[in-house]
Image (cartoon, rainbow, N blue to C red):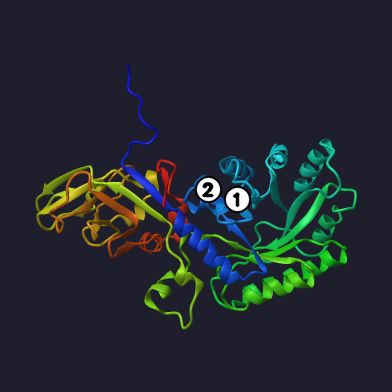
Amino acid sequence: MRSVLPSHTRPIWAEISASRLVANYRALQAAAGPQVEMLAVIKANAYGHGATECAPILAAAGAKWLGVTSVEEGVAVRQSLGILPQGMPQPRLLVMCSVWFGEEASVLDYGLTPVVWETYHLDLLEAEAKRRRLPARSLAVHVEIDTGMSRQGVAPGALLQQLLARFTEESPLLLEGVMTHLASTEIADDPQDRRQMRDFKLALEQVAAAELQPAYVHAGNTSSTDSGYMPTAIPALAAELGAKAMTRAGLALYGYTLPLELCMSGGFPEPHVGCSLRPVMTWKTRVVSLRDIAEGTSIGYNSTFVATKPMRVALLPVGYADGFRRGLSSSTEEAGGYVLLHGMRAAILGRVSMDLTVVDVTHLPQTKIGDEVVLVGSMGTEFVGANEQARIAGTSVYEVLCGISDRVPRVVVE
């Protein structure tokens, strides 16, 4: 009889700290203020942290709204929430990239709230709602305004007017929210944001002129919570419409903000919410092989690294198929990334390949097979952040985190 393996046996995993996720959520909610609704964004598999793992944690922490990418992701999250403790309502799920043909039934079956901007979005949803004989204004949607990103959203003016005309007293559709997305909130008081907010104000005036009363107005991501004029501008716009302001917290939920380096160096002149956040993920693996190599020995594909002295090296069972960036590779002439082992840095040697990575442990003679290695996160007093890996690899922290593949199981701790 064949043995049955557990679902994950490779020595590679990502630990997700429930306590840190909750602490980050509460810090961001406090920074936004009690009058602002917080939407916890768990799209793109919770920025690589595992949407179905993070959603129940955030719901238990009191999150009333969660943001997902797609209907498919929304269904998986709703199923992961299951039956919550008595008295705890199910969070609302905002589908931030709308609905596609054939998904409209799932929107209703799983209680999802889609963002809309195309007339076909409304056609699909309205037809399904009428087929089910839903009452007037019972299927909530949020309309996205394109104020300068030129991606999702309807432009203010004639196109918006055409869309707003669909929200009649008889229609099952309810305009619950109006939103936009800003291009440069990481840059305090950027002129582009001010232009976008001006156009958003014009769009909200159109909504008011159409005698529609949304419950929510939202434009800000994490960076707008406590930077520049955004913390007051968005609630002010919402108040003019008699609506509640909402902010969408994404990357910061997981402990990263774009000015993280300033926090760590004390570079902010005053307290910044980003400085109170802690990374939620610790990505780990183990040493699976050790060897001593002589001077002149090459390592990895294309022999990009050649030892200039005798070395001891360790093999790690992780590569770019797991999301460990190939841009962390090194050569004889140029350093690359590093990992943490025994609380110290161990440099990556040669190319990061599909499934394997070699690191230098010459300075760590105590290293043995099975030793734990941190790829992203803390060990002792050392820290290797996704932001630092992004800098070395020439990409963004978003891409590093979201790129961690499904081959890496997410394990909730604490």
* Left or right placement of residue 226 versus residue 336 in this view: right
Residue that extends furthest to the top in the rendered view of this protein = 1
- Mark yes or no: residue 17 visible: yes
Q: Which mark is residue 51?
A: 2
| Secondary structure type for disc 2 | helix
**Outermost residue to the right:** 170
For the residue pair 80 and 284, the one nearer the viewer reads as 80
Asked if one can make out residue 42 in the rendered structure from this viewpoint, the answer is: no
Extreme-front residue of the structure: 86
Q: Position of residue 209 (x, y in %)?
A: 87, 67
Q: As drawn, which residue projects farthest toward the bottom?
A: 269
The picture places residue 194, in percent across and down from the top left corner, at 66, 76
> The residue tagged with tag 1: helix, strand or loop?
strand
Position of the N terminus by quadrant: top left
Q: Are marks 1 and 2 in contact (CB under 8 Å)?
A: yes
Please name the residue shown 15% across and 55% down the image.
307
Q: Residues within 10 Å of mark 2 (few under 14, many from 20)?
A: many
**Marking on residue 68:** 1
Left or right: residue 289 versus residue 270 is left
- Which residue corresponds to the image point at 23% horizontal and 46% vertical from the top-left? 287
247 displayed left or right of 272: right
Q: Is residue 345 above or below residue 412?
A: below
Q: Quadrant of residue 183?
A: bottom right
183 vs 82: above or below: below
Q: Nearer the viewer, residue 100 or 20?
A: 20
Q: Amino acid at mark 1?
A: Val
